[in-house]
Amino acid sequence: MITLTRIKNMIRSLNWYSSLLIYKDIRVLRILILGFSSGLPILLIFSTLSLWLKSAGIDRSTITIFSWAGLAYSFKFLWAPVIDKMPIGYLTKNFGHRKSWLILSQLALIILLLMVGFVDPKNNLKLMAFLIVFIGFSSATQDAMVDTYRIESAPINLQSAMSGTYIIGYRLGMITAGAGSLFLASLFGGDEKIYNANAWQRTYMTMAFLQSLGLLCSLLSPEPTSKRKIIKNFKDRFRLICIFIFSILSFVSVFNFFPNIEIEDPFSKGVLTSSKFLIAFLAMFCTFYISIQIKLIPKQILTSTFWDPISNFVKKYGTMAIIILIIIGFYRVADIVMGVVANLFYSDKGYTLNQIATFSKFWGLLATIFGGLLGGILASRYNNFIVLLLGAILAASSNLLFALLATLEPKVGYLMVVIIADNISGGIASVAFVAFLSSLTNVNFTTSQFALFTSFMLFFPKIIGGYSGMIVDSVGYYNFFVLTALMGLPVIILILVFKNKIYIK
């Protein structure tokens, strides 16, 4: 006999099943491939490249300089406004504005990775450095355009699922470029005691082939239908590019050559770092101001490109824009700051490198994938506010598990439980947050605004994370993890207090 309770349970099961079916949508699956394409290059210019350079006999100080190529990921918001406004001739005419930039960045990555496959850093280090810098720039541009395409190619009810598959694809790309490339290098003979440049070159050529999956996906995907205001006059476009290049050079020069002042106090160091950014921005704005004053470019061109995305956000949300920016700036502070010392903590607790690698990489990856899928399903069943709040609570409270781990004996079972729980929490929080940021953007300024939001998201956590080692030395691991959990509390309170004023689609 079928009871009322059984019928209700069957209905609930069907609702969950229908929520899972959202991942069958071709638009959601498409972002999985584009996410993989975005995640692939980053480790090829960081950890994987460092091992190649080390095996080539390059000194440690030179190897670390190559990490500057990663600045492109932090500063992509500087050229994102230009991408929003600038068409690319033949490509834009035949593929559309978003696809043209996406295709261009992916083509550049494939060509650059193939070129790296013909370079031996032991004999031509300068050329290698030149290629790696442009790979960083092209990869950051691809990231910005994949975010733009994801936001503009599907309605809001698919955004959470697309955020989940993007995060999963990105992590799979990173694993492929990290562990996968090391496996290939070893397979090609790179693990021999004698340096084998060919093994690393063939590995990077293989990565170029895998990068082409993203290009193929872009070519077969439709252009979003929303219209974009672009600069049509060729002279205006040329002037904008020239002035933009000079402004970027001003920003980077001031940022990189800012006096290095040794200060012990963490708060003073944070103020100094923030001042460094502000002065670099001031140098950039001075370039714009001088260009307008000497009439190199009409004021309207610069304001519509660089100022309008910011003013649009401020006008839309009014005084709430400040609250939203605070939420953006500190939403991930708890887990990002904790993550800086996670591996050091595992090692200090007595876990072996093999145990750390197995549980943080393999099980951690599976947990992140599960968390991403679960986050997308939850967002499809409930409103974005609930999932955003849940993500904030999980991101902060999972740090308390690390505090608990700090008091326990170093057993593998404890480590596995904590890492899995932390990565599931991180996966849900990431999906909720990316969906939240997507809901804030205006389709006329998608690339500019989303790049600005994501850069702002990392600014304060990265600064605080830089002093995490000093904090651990002062208060110990247990108190550090409790403190990082408390860092997430203000964001939780802000979300609860202003839940009716924050416009979440």
Image: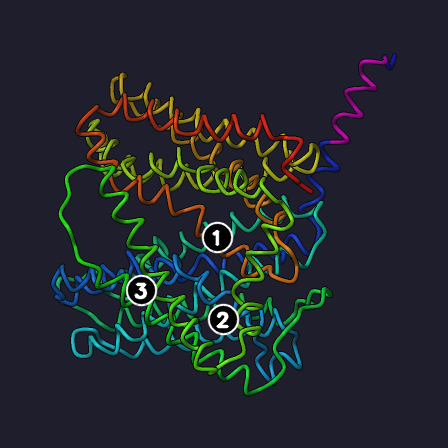
Q: Position of residue 486 (x, y in %)?
A: 39, 24
- The structure residue drawn at horizontal position 39% and vertical position 41%, both measured from the top left corner, is 362
Indicate the amino acid at tag 1.
Tyr
- The reply, left or right, for residue 130 in relation to residue 229 is left
Separation of residues labelled 3 and 1 (CA atoms): 19 Å
Whether 217 is drawn above or below 259: the answer is below
| Residue at the limit of the structure toward the right, as seen here | 1
Rendered-image quadrant of the C terminus: top right
- The structure residue drawn at horizontal position 43% and vertical position 65%, both measured from the top left corner, is 139
In the rendered image, residue 7 lying in the magenta stretch gets the answer yes
What residue would you read off at disc 2? 106
Which stretch appears magenta? 4-15
Q: Quadrant of residue 85?
A: bottom right
Q: Quadrant of residue 95?
A: bottom right
What residue would you read off at disc 1? 170
- The reply, left or right, for residue 172 in relation to residue 499 is left
